[in-house]
Image: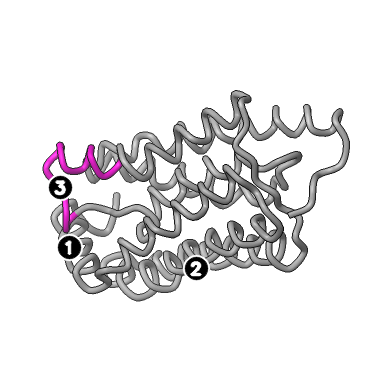
C-alpha cells in the first residue's frame, strides 16, 4: 500500500505545478531543442542533448522528489537520489566524455523512440485531461518523473550506435515502480510506463547487438 491516496497525490501536483510555473513551458522548449538537434545533428549536439536530459532528471530528483513529493511519501528522498544519479550518468557519459550521439533515422528503433517522445509530450497530458486530472493537477512532461521516464526511453532509442546499458537501468526501474503505483492511484496514463521501460530495454538490447556488428559508436 502507498502512504498516500489519489486525492493527496493530485493535490500535491496542483501545488507543485503552480509553484514552479512557467518551468513547464521551458521544459517543452528544451524538448523541442532535443528533437531539432537529433533531426539535424551538428558538432556538440550529443553533449547538448545529454545535458538537457541530465537537467530533467536532476530537477525531478532535487525539486520534485526531495522538495515536494517527500511531504507525502517517506521514500521520496531515496527516489530523488536515484534520479540525481541518473542525471550524473548523463553528464559523465554524454557531456564530459562525449560518448553519446543522437540521430533520427528510418529504422524501427527511431520510429518507436519518436512515438514514445510524442506520447510523453502530447498523449500523456491529453489522457490526464480526458480522465479528469488535467492542469494543474496533472503530472507534466519533464517536471514529473513518469512522463520524463517515457521521454528518456524514447530518446535513448535515438542514440547512434550502441546505447550504454547503465543509462537505461534507472529509467526501467522507475517504469516498474511508477507502473505499479498507477494501480493504486488511478493514473491510467502511467500504465504506459512498464511498456515503455521493458519494451524500450528490449529494443535497446536488439539495437546494441546490431551495433556490435557494425563498428564503433560515433562521437557526439
Label 1: element kind: helix
Q: Is residue 134 magenta?
A: yes
Q: Which residues are magenta?
A: 124-137
Q: Residue at x 66, y 43 (%)?
A: 159
Q: Is residue 27 visible to the viewer in this orientation of the structure?
A: yes
Label 2 packing within 10 angstroms: few (<14), some (14-19), many (20+): many
Q: Secondary structure at mark 3?
A: loop
Instruction: Examine the rendered structure and indicate whether residue 66 appears above or below residue 27.
Output: below
Quarter location, residue 85: bottom right
Measured in 3D between alpha carbons, the distance from the residue under mark 2 to the one under mark 1, in whole angstroms, is: 21 Å
Of the image marks 3 and 1, the number of the one nearer the N terminus: 1
User: Mark 1 Cα within 10 Å, few/some/many (few <14, many 20+)?
Assistant: some
Residue assigned mark 3:
133
Q: Is residue 102 magenta?
A: no
Query: In screen coordinates, is 116 left or right of 125?
Result: right
- Location of mark 2 (residue): 58
Q: Position of residue 174 (x, y in %)?
A: 47, 49
Using the image, tell me which numbered label, if any, was put on residue 132.
Answer: none
- Cα separation between marks 3 and 1: 10 Å
Res 142 → quadrant: bottom left
**Disc number for residue 14:** 1
Please tell me which residue is depicted at 36% across the width and 45% down the height of the picture.
Answer: 121
Residue for point 73% across, 55% down: 220
Q: Is residue 193 left or right of residue 39?
A: left
Front one among 167 and 77: 167
Residue 178: x %, y % from top left: 39, 46
Q: Nearer the viewer, residue 85 or 163?
A: 163
Q: Is residue 173 visible?
A: no
Precedes in sequence: disc 2 or disc 1 = 1
Question: Where does residue 115 sit, x and y in percent of width and height?
Answer: 45, 32
- The image shows residue 120 at horizontal and vertical percentages of 38, 43
Compared to 190, does 110 lie above or below?
Answer: above
Amino acid at each position: 500500500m502507498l502512504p498516500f491516496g489519489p486525492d493527496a497525490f493530485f493535490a500535491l501536483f496542483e501545488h507543485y505545478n503552480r509553484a514552479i510555473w512557467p518551468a513547464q513551458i521551458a521544459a517543452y522548449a528544451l524538448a523541442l531543442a532535443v528533437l531539432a538537434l537529433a533531426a539535424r545533428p551538428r558538432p556538440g549536439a550529443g553533449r547538448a542533448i545529454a545535458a538537457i536530459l541530465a537537467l530533467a532528471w536532476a530537477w525531478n530528483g532535487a525539486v520534485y522528489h526531495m522538495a515536494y513529493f517527500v511531504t507525502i511519501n517517506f521514500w521520496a528522498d531515496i527516489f530523488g537520489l536515484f534520479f540525481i544519479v541518473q542525471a550524473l550518468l548523463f553528464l559523465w557519459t554524454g557531456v564530459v566524455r562525449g560518448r553519446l550521439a543522437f540521430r533520427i533515422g528510418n529504422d524501427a528503433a527511431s520510429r518507436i523512440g519518436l512515438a514514445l517522445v510524442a506520447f510523453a509530450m502530447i498523449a500523456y497530458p491529453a489522457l490526464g485531461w480526458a480522465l479528469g486530472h488535467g492542469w494543474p493537477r496533472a503530472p507534466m512532461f519533464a517536471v514529473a518523473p513518469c512522463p520524463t521516464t517515457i521521454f528518456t526511453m524514447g530518446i535513448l532509442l535515438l542514440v547512434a550506435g550502441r546505447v550504454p546499458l547503465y543509462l537505461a537501468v534507472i529509467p526501467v526501474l522507475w517504469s516498474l515502480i511508477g507502473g505499479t503505483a498507477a494501480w493504486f492511484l488511478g493514473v491510467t496514463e502511467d500504465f504506459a510506463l512498464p511498456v515503455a521501460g521493458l519494451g524500450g530495454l528490449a529494443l535497446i538490447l536488439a539495437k546494441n547487438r546490431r551495433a556490435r556488428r557494425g563498428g564503433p559508436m560515433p562521437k557526439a
